[in-house]
Amino acid sequence: MPWGRHDWLARSGLTDSRLLQLVRVTMPAGKAHAFHRHPHMEELLYVVAGRVEQWVGRESRVLGPGELAHVPMNEVHGSYNVFAEPVTFLAVLGPAIIDGPALVDVQHDEPWRSLKAPIG
């Protein structure tokens, strides 16, 4: 991915997990997974190392090691590494069985583009 390395730890085809996916993401400084939503999945983000500016809806907070964010199904969210060091986090997504798009990019739509400048 252009915004960070993805190491899939659990998903269909890798494990017997049918309903959950687990990915470790390492995002370099200055990169972001800009505003998007998962129409059919909720997500948990757990920071392992570094810090990230995590948006869930119109609210943001800085997460550090050991901190967690919950993203309800179809909620717009984004992860922005505005810090000088890389951030590593785990993302758990489920259910892994979906009908339709797994991700919808909304970074160029209002009100999201006014909250944070689009990337790329």
Image: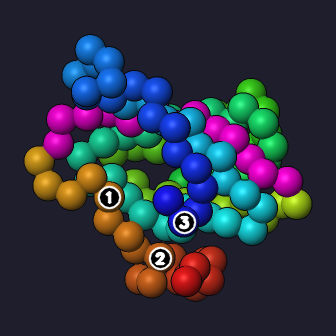
Determine whether label 2 and label 1 are within 8 Å by CB. no
Give the total number of marks visible in the rendering: 3
Q: Residues within 10 Å of mark 2 (few under 14, many from 20)?
A: many
Residue 53 painted magenta? no
Mark 2 — residue?
107
Question: What SS does tag 1 mark?
Answer: loop
Between residues 62 and 2, which one lies in front from this camera angle?
2
Instruction: Give the amino acid type for the residue marked by disc 1 in the picture.
Output: Leu
Residue 54 at x, y = what percent? 64, 53
Label 2 or label 3, whichever lies nearer to me, is 3
Q: Is residue 4 left or right of residue 82?
A: left
Mark 1 — residue?
103
- 42, above or below 36, in the image: above
Can residue 21 be spotted in the picture? yes
Q: CA distance from mark 2 to mark 1?
A: 12 Å
Between residues 41 and 49, which one lies in front from this camera angle?
49
Marking on residue 2: 3
Magenta residue span: 85-98
Q: Is residue 10 left or right of residue 54?
A: left
Question: What SS does tag 3 mark?
Answer: loop
Q: Is residue 114 left or right of residue 35?
A: right
Instruction: Give the amino acid type for the residue marked by disc 2 in the picture.
Output: Gln
Question: What SS does tag 2 mark?
Answer: loop
Q: Residues within 10 Å of mark 1 (few under 14, many from 20)?
A: few
Q: CA distance from mark 2 to mark 3?
A: 15 Å
Q: CA distance from mark 1 to mark 3?
A: 15 Å
Residue 105 at x, y = what percent? 38, 70
Q: Is residue 38 left or right of residue 100?
A: right
